[in-house]
């Protein structure tokens, strides 16, 4: 499954080919942060040694080594439902904390 690095929305391969922007948040999909070779811990920020230096890793670029990062699909659906509901509860609690009376 492919997802946007910024909003974590699922991205289909058709959307990625047709539109280079995330349909959910509008961020660039063909950017280093969505690439399988991106590594924040490296000085070059890229596992590919032949890749060109790109100053802004969050914007669209034309790197020929770009491969969209695929996240593994959960095998246990009940585990996914539990983690989603837990994350939703955490988001609601956070929003309630800063809600204006």
Image (tube, helix red, strand yellow):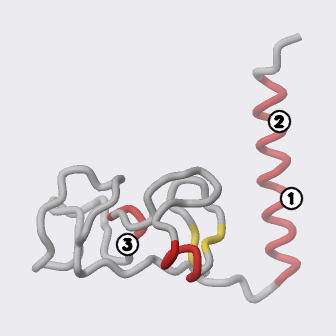
Residue for badge 1: 85
In depth, the one of 24 and 9 nearer the eye is 24
Q: Residue at x 27, y 60 (%)?
A: 41
Q: Nearer the viewer, mark 1 or mark 3?
A: 3
Q: Residue at x 10, y 79 (%)?
A: 50
Q: Answer left or right for 85 relative to 61.
A: right
Q: Earlier in the sequence, mark 3 or mark 2?
A: 3
Q: Secondary structure at mark 2?
A: helix
Residue at mark 3: 35
What distance separates the C-alpha of mark 1 from that of mark 2? 12 Å
**Position of residue 78 in the picture relative to residue 11 (left or right):** right
In the rendered view, tell whether residue 38 sits above or below residue 90.
Answer: below
Q: Earlier in the sequence, mark 1 or mark 3?
A: 3
Q: Residue furthest front?
A: 18
Q: Which mark is residue 37?
A: none
Residue occupying the far top of the picture: 101
Q: Give percent across and percent down for residue 99.
A: 82, 20
Select label 3 or label 2 by which is in front: 3
Name the residue located 80 percent from the left edge and 62 percent from the top edge: 84
Q: Mark 1 vs mark 2: which is more N-terminal?
A: 1
The answer to which image quadrant residue 2 occupies is: bottom right
Residue 93: mark in rendering: 2
Residue depicted at 79% across the width and 24% down the height: 97
């Amino acid at each position: 499954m492919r997802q946007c690095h910024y909003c974590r929305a699922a991205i289909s391969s058709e959307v990625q080919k047709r539109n280079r922007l995330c349909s959910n948040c509008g961020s660039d999909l063909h950017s280093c942060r969505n690439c399988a070779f991106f590594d924040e811990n490296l000085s070059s920020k890229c596992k590919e040694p032949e890749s060109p230096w790109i100053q802004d890793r969050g914007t669209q670029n034309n790197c020929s080594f770009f491969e969209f990062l695929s996240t593994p699909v959960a095998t246990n659906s009940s585990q996914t439902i539990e983690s989603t509901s837990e994350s939703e509860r955490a988001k609601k609690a956070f929003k309630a904390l800063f809600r204006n009376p």
